[in-house]
Amino acid sequence: MLQVCAAWSTAVSIPRHATSSSMLLSMTNNNDNNDSNNNNNKNRRSFISKGTISFLTWSSFAWGGNSQLPACAIAKNPRYIENQIEMKYGNGPDGNPRTRGILVRRFTGDSTPYSFPVGPVRLVKEWPEQPPFDEKDFTRADSNDDGTFYSLPRLVYHIDEPAVSSLTQYYRKNIPPKSRILDICSSWVSHYPLEFPKTMKRIAGTGINPLELVANDQFGKGDTIARNLNNDPTLPYADGEFDVVTCVVSIDYLIHPIEVLKEVHRVLRPGGKVIISQSNRCFPSKAIGMWLKMNDRQHLELINGYFQYAGGFQPRKAFDITATGEGQNGFDPMFIIEAIKA
């Protein structure tokens, strides 16, 4: 369940399988197509872009109340971490300085009552030699600049706690220590285990909102670059710079996914790994048209097709890592596609 941290936070919880863009339009105020609101959005985007974000000096820890968990598991890592984040806007000479404090709760993925099975999914679709896609496959209900849509930081979760936790546990088991990791299409959380900033050689991030990237405490200091991959699908990194690239529930928004995966291939070392995770939650007005017409299994086949046309990857492996536990019929599903650079 998403946490709305402040009145201005444009949090959206889209029910499963929802595809009506009217649901999103009614919940946000930066997706209106009329000229007046577009001008206001541009002004607001400029205002927000001059802002800063910082963590205050205190944080509180909350543990899950599951009495069946062993005490050592509870003591090792908390289930939740709460931080107060201070955001400052309008610091420039023409700005109207404002400060807002926001209480955010982070899911650690640990000390939960869930189980995390990993089941292989067989990829069977045979793709033709040339990409069969056309322009309309990548059209979106809202074709306006993504920079405007995402100009306000959304310090909320877009998948539920079981899905976050399953991904965290998968990362822990499948990303070796001392790896150099890049998280693309990133935000204020990357869902890595709490120990990763200490056990990994490097964690870098690129995403569309610079304030969300700064709020992500798992990235190395200053190791974030804001980039709208729908405007520029290149990655601002050197060849072979990373061991692992991750992308969380975002590939459905990319209008140049094959070009982005070619860039992912370039920045990976030989033998490096890509981990694409996907659920069935989305902003329907921003997801590409063909994605909204597909089910979970078809999404995995589509991502596999993207990898094929990007080239240079070994045969892909897909997994269903959806968490189980009490109430599991209501959990968000979670799937993985892994690809190794040949």
Image: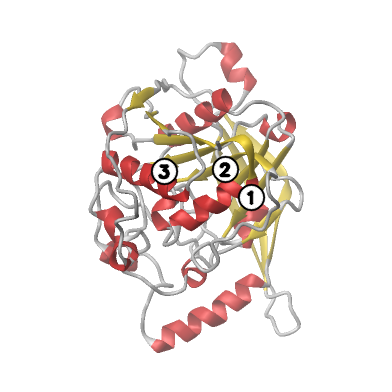
- Which residue is outermost to the bottom? 36
- Toward the front, the furthest residue is 129
| Left or right side of 141 for 156 | right
Note whether 108 is above or below 286 in the view shown. above
Residue 45 left/right relative to 166:
right
Label 2 or label 3, whichever lies nearer to me, is: 2
Q: Is residue 168 visible?
A: yes
User: What's the amino acid at mark 1?
Assistant: Gly
- The residue where tag 2 is placed is 190
Q: Nearer the viewer, residue 81 or 130?
A: 130
Residue at point 61%, 49% (across, down): 266
x then y, percent, for residue 50 = 68, 72
The secondary structure type at the circle numbered 2 is: loop
**Is residue 218 shown left or right of residue 105?**
right
**Which residue lies under the disc numbered 3?**
159
Question: What's the CA distance linking mark 1 and mark 3?
Answer: 19 Å
Q: Earlier in the sequence, mark 1 or mark 2?
A: 2
Which residue was labeled with disc 1?
205
Under circle 3, the secondary element is loop
Crowding at dot 2, Cα within 10 Å, few <14 / some 14-19 / many 20+, comes out as many
Of the two numbered discs 2 and 3 on the same chain, state the one appearing first in sequence: 3
Which is more foreground, mark 1 or mark 2?
Answer: 1
Element marked by disc 1: strand
